[in-house]
Image (cartoon, grey):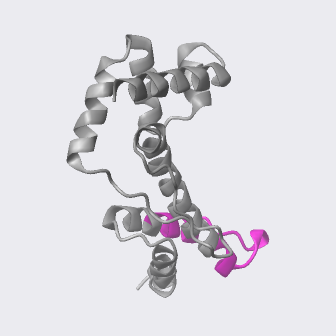
């Protein structure tokens, strides 16, 4: 067993620990965190702190980033269009978030139909935002400011709500 494999075997429970803390059961997301751990092991520099801190932070960051991406995808349409606009947060000291729930298939179809009814520019922006791009990234593609993208997204949400 190589040094890298031994380190990974020793620290792999860290992935399970953070998966439990964030209430993640999705195997793909857990695998992404394992990859983050492996990269942290390969890139560890003793000058940057202890292994424990470095590895824990790498795994925690992988989960948080993936959950943020999922939340961005969900936030645009699902929360504003459904009656329940609450986002569930854990009360732990890390501010960990619970994994977002997936809407029922009939709501997904309804939302897809509403998005398809939007004018071309709004539809394109909504789809980019739902795919996980930030307002700043979309603004760079569209050639407008990120605040204008926020206005367009708000306009699209209002338009879709009016169609319900």
- For the magenta stretch, what is the residue range? 35-54
Q: Position of residue 144 (x, y in %)?
A: 62, 14
Q: Nearer the viewer, residue 121 or 34?
A: 121
The residue sitting at 62% across, 29% down in the picture is 136
Q: Nearer the viewer, residue 62 or 41?
A: 62
In which quarter of the view is residue 138 placed?
Answer: top right
* Quarter placement of the C terminus: top left
* Quarter placement of the N terminus: bottom left
Q: Is residue 3 visible?
A: no
Q: Main secondary structure of the magenta part?
A: helix
Q: Nearer the viewer, residue 32 or 44?
A: 32
Q: Position of residue 23 (x, y in %)?
A: 44, 73
Q: Position of residue 103 (x, y in %)?
A: 31, 50
**Rendered view: 39 above or below 50:** above
Position of 157 with respect to 44 (left or right) is: left
The residue sitting at 54% across, 20% down in the picture is 152
Residue 49 on the magenta segment = yes
């Amino acid at each position: 067993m190589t040094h890298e494999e031994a380190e990974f075997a020793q620290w792999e429970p860290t992935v399970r620990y953070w998966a439990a803390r964030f209430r993640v059961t999705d195997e793909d997301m857990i695998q992404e965190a394992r990859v983050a751990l492996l990269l942290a092991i390969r890139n560890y520099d003793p000058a940057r702190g202890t292994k424990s801190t470095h590895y824990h932070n790498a795994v925690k960051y992988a989960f948080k980033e993936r959950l943020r991406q999922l939340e961005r995808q969900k936030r645009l349409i699902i929360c504003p269009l459904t009656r329940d606009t609450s986002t569930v947060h854990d009360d732990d000291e890390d501010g960990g978030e619970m994994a977002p729930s997936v809407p029922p298939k009939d709501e997904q179809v309804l939302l897809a139909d509403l998005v398809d009814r939007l004018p071309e520019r709004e539809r394109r922006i909504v789809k980019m935002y739902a795919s996980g791009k930030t307002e700043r990234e979309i603004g760079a593609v569209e050639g407008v400011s990120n605040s204008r993208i926020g206005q367009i997204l708000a306009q699209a949400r209002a338009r879709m709500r009016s169609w319900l």
